[in-house]
Amino acid sequence: ERNTGRRLGNEEMARLFREIMSSCLALEQPLKVAYLGPEGTFTQAAAMKHFGHAVISKPMAAIDEVFREVAAGAVNFGVVPVENSTEGAVNHTLDSFLEHDMVICGEVELRIHHHLLVGENTKTDSISRIYSHAQSLAQCRKWLDAHYPNVERVAVSSNAEAAKRVKGEWNSAAIAGDMAAGLYGLTRLAEKIEDRPDNSTRFLMIGSQEVPPTGDDKTAIIVSMSNKPGALHELLVPFHDNGIDLTRIETRPSRSGKWTYVFFIDFIGH
């Protein structure tokens, strides 16, 4: 569309140049990007925000399948959710890093707005179950308790999968976003039902190639150490002594034996 004299904001300019770069790359050799599917997920929205529309997108049924596609070289990049501001870490993603030698190539943060969606054949007074991803159900827990306390909540692999199921049913609803609502032709029975208005999710772009410094970087590492007094202190002291800003620490069970753990640490810098 023609610009009528209004100056574009920084976000609009970034989106414009992203689409230009995406289209230029597509003319040479289109990027292949795997994401947690099916079509209509927030992960697909994150992939489009980062890579633009001119890529070959490949929806996968589960997070570990995204990792496997990247590891096998079937795609250039993968996109997976890693952390939600309301419910915390996506453990399936963290655990997949323990099984695959992968590089984090980028990060996207999305504001997440959940809607209660129904199909055209649904009788709103006969809803007996609500489908969504487990994280989304948790992010809308208070709203669901207040409005549908006795309705069964069914966790499925993704929000888009929930929307896909509801399209063909008459007594169910789904919690999903705008993209899924439009893709599957569903009606918004209630909008923005997330318990926290600042609800956001971070998504990671994973690949196998190293990424050069940009000047505005974050690094993620996985650390395994012996269980002894002061071990965590010894791990964190070098960060303090060098003035390195830690942005996240998560603990997950190790694969080396029961009651052993690894630390996922994010810090500012490259």
Image (cartoon, grey):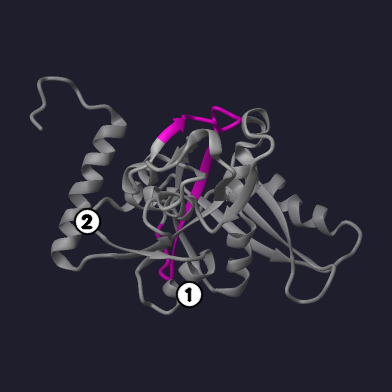
Q: Measuring from the top left, give residue 95's x and y in whole percent.
A: 63, 65
Could you tell me which residue is drawn at 84 percent across and 59 percent down?
231
Element carrying mark 2: loop
Residue at 61% from the left image edge and 51% from the top image edge: 154
- Write down the region rendered in magenta: 188-212
Residue 18 is left or right of residue 1, and the answer is right
Could you say where residue 70 lies in the image, as x and y percent from the top left?
43, 72
Residue 94 or 249: which is nearer the viewer? 94
- Secondary structure at badge 1 equals helix
Residue 252 seen from this side: yes
- 4 sits to left or right of 196: left
| Residue 259 found in image quarter | bottom right
Q: Which residue is mark 1?
A: 68
Q: Amino acid at mark 1?
A: Arg
Task: Name the kind of residue labelled 2 in the image.
Answer: Ala
Most distant residue in the bottom direction: 72
